[in-house]
């Protein structure tokens, strides 16, 4: 009789423990559906191609809900609107649009008064090293580094953009560059073609300079000497 009571008592304990575990599983949030990451946010006033700030931010997304927390104290809390992908409503009730023009580099959110470019690569936030004008590229990782003439779409004047050069046999090379917007990508100069990662590019050789124009309107100039070395 005592053994029977003990057995039933153990069964009740196990049943209660199992029920407790099941309840815990049901009430725990589904973290697998959420995604949070540090990012770099570049802020542009509406209808302007001149940024006013580049700052650290944090991007959170779960089941369509997006939160962008900026280091300047601004937080964008965005809820999806209807069935239209990429359309949100912010805390003020304004409509916000998400665009994927940055490809795998990040996302763009268009607010009524400003646009927030969210970049996954945060290297643009790193403090500049005055002793290395081609930062973040160094000869520790590349055969050579250089500053290349570059300009963004709509700009009249060229600036300088850093790059790291990986040379190959036969006068070929891959050059990893950092754009004015903070995009890091690779331009491949092969014997029979020139291409770039994550974007389309048209290339023509003028004298000893490769003239590059990308699908977003950016222009670059890459000297043959940078590719071939020597």
Image (cartoon, helix red, strand yellow):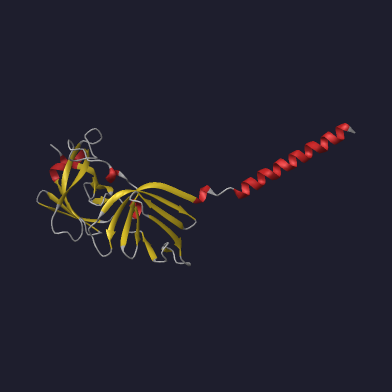
- Residue at the outermost left position: 207
Q: Classify 111 as above or below 197.
A: below
* Residue at (32% x, 45% y) in the render: 122
Image coordinates for residue 111, horizontal then vertical, percent: 34, 63
Image coordinates for residue 56, horizontal then vertical, percent: 33, 47
Left-right relation of 69 to 53: right
- Residue at the outermost right position: 1
* Residue at (48% x, 50% y) in the render: 34
For the N terminus, the image quarter is top right
Image coordinates for residue 161, horizontal then vertical, percent: 19, 47
Left-right relation of 44 to 220: right
Image coordinates for residue 2, horizontal then vertical, percent: 88, 32
Give the mark count. Answer: 0
Q: Classify 126 as above or below 152.
A: above
For the C terminus, the image quarter is top left
* Residue at (74% x, 39% y) in the render: 14
**Foreground pick, 16 / 102:** 16
- Residue at the outermost front position: 73
Left-right relation of 65 to 122: right
């Amino acid at each position: 009789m005592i053994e029977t009571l003990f057995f039933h008592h153990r069964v009740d304990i196990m049943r209660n423990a199992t029920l407790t575990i099941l309840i815990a599983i049901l009430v725990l949030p589904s973290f697998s559906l959420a995604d949070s990451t540090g990012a770099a946010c570049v802020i542009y006033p509406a209808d302007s191609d001149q940024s006013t700030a580049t700052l650290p931010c944090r991007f959170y997304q779960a089941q369509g809900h997006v939160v962008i927390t900026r280091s300047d104290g601004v937080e964008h809390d965005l809820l999806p609107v209807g069935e239209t992908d990429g359309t949100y409503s912010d805390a003020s009730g304004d409509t916000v649009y998400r665009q994927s023009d940055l490809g795998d580099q990040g996302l763009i959110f268009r607010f009524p008064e400003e646009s927030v470019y969210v970049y996954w690569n945060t290297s643009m936030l790193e403090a500049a090293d005055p002793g290395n004008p081609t930062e973040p590229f160094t000869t520790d990782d590349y055969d050579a580094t250089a500053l290349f003439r570059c300009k963004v779409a709509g700009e009249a004047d060229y600036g300088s953009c850093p790059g790291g050069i990986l040379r190959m046999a036969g006068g070929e090379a891959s050059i990893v560059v950092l754009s004015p917007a903070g995009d890091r990508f690779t331009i491949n100069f092969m014997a029979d073609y020139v291409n770039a990662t994550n974007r389309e590019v048209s290339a023509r050789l003028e004298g000893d300079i490769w003239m590059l124009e990308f699908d977003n309107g950016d222009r670059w100039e890459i000297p043959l000497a940078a590719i071939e070395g020597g």
